[in-house]
Structure formats: structure tokens, C-alpha cells
Amino acid sequence: MTAIQNGTGKSLGQITEFIAKDMVPLSTVTKPGFTALINTLDKRYSKASRTYFSQTAIPELYRTCKDKVTAELKTVEFFATTTDMWSSRTSEPYQSLTVHFIKEDFNLKARCLQAAYFPDDHIGGNIAAGLREGLASWDLHEEKHVCITTDNTSSMVLAARLNEMTRFQCFRSEE
């Protein structure tokens, strides 16, 4: 049984989800105000360290979430994807990959599979390779891939062509 599941683990699990969903810094758990708030809500809470959250709780939450999405994707008959290249606030480059599919009950679902660090030049061949790696890491097969939506940059157009993917361009409404 993990720390997230036992004893004060319920509190630790909720704090882990708070950190992940609200994208708050791990240092939050060391702040006196946060500790006082949590102790007010749950007297059994024993202060966990940033290290616990960064090395144990967050990776465990990630594995649990990834396992759930992986199981969900195994049931998908066909899927589409979207991708984009972007930079963080600190100018680090990333490639995003989102999968879209329709469940048996006809509900449309979308799952962001990755925002992968992408230090390579943003040229068509590199982007194409990144897409192939992303799909392979989630065991998504090209014969089930219906189409990909990208922006209209020449590198994205080339990446889709190199991967022999049907590409749709994204569009913006003028409001």
C-alpha cells in the first residue's frame, strides 16, 4: 500500500492532485499557511516534504493516470490527433500531441498525451520523427490514425507529408 492510499494518505493524495491540477509549485507544501490550512482540515496530516511529492507522489499519480489513458486507448477503433510546437515562459521548446476519439457511447474524447521537450530544430523531418515517437510511446498505430490537425507552417505541412498523414489545417474564427 502506498503513502497516498493509507493513513493520512488520503490527505496526501488530495494535496498531490491539487499540485498537479492547479500547477502550483512544490514549495507550496512547505509554506506555513498551507500547513496550517491542511492541519485545520485534517489533524492527522503529517507534513510531507517537497521531495516526497516530486519523487514519489507526482510520479505515482502520473503512472496511475497514464495507465488509465493507455487502457482507454486500447479500446479505440480509430483516432485523430492534433499537434503544435510551442515555447514555455522560459523559452524552452515543446511539441504537444493530443489524441481525439469517439467512445462506444458516441461521446467525443480528447486526451493530451504529451508536451515533450523538443530541443531539435523545428524542421519537418524532426517534427515528423517526434510525432512517430509520440504515437509509438502510446502504442497508437498508423492504420487507425484518421488525420492530424496542425497549423499551416511549412514544417508542420512537411511533417504530416513525411509521415503520410492526412492533414487538416487549424483555423481561427474572426470574432
Image: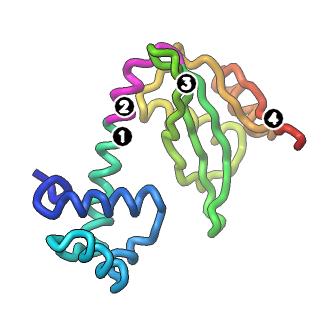
Q: Crowdedness of circle 2 by 10 Å Cα count: few (<14), some, many (20+)?
A: some
Task: Give the foreground label among 1 and 3.
Answer: 3
- Which amino acid type is marked by label 1? Lys
Label 1 near label 2: C-beta < 8 Å?
Answer: yes
Question: Which residue is outermost to the bottom?
Answer: 32
Task: Give the foreground label among 3 and 2.
Answer: 3
Q: Crowdedness of circle 4 by 10 Å Cα count: few (<14), some, many (20+)?
A: few
- SS type, badge 2: helix
Which region shows up in magenta? 68-78
- Which amino acid type is marked by label 2? Thr
Q: Residue at x 35, y 42 (%)?
A: 65
Whole-angstrom CA distance, mark 4 to mark 3, is 20 Å
Residue designated by label 1: 66
Q: Which mark is residue 18?
A: none
User: To which quarter of the image does residue 63 belong?
Assistant: top left
Q: Residue at x 39, y 18 (%)?
A: 75
**Is 94 a magenta residue?**
no
Residue 98 is situated, as x and y percent measured from the top left of the image, at: 56, 36
Front residue of this view, candidates 111 and 150: 111
- Which amino acid type is marked by label 3? Leu
Does 133 sit above or below residue 25? above
Residue 12 is situated, as x and y percent measured from the top left of the image, at: 24, 63
Question: Which residue is outermost to the right?
Answer: 174
The numbered mark, 3 or 2, whose residue comes first in the sequence reads 2
Q: Which mark is residue 70?
A: 2
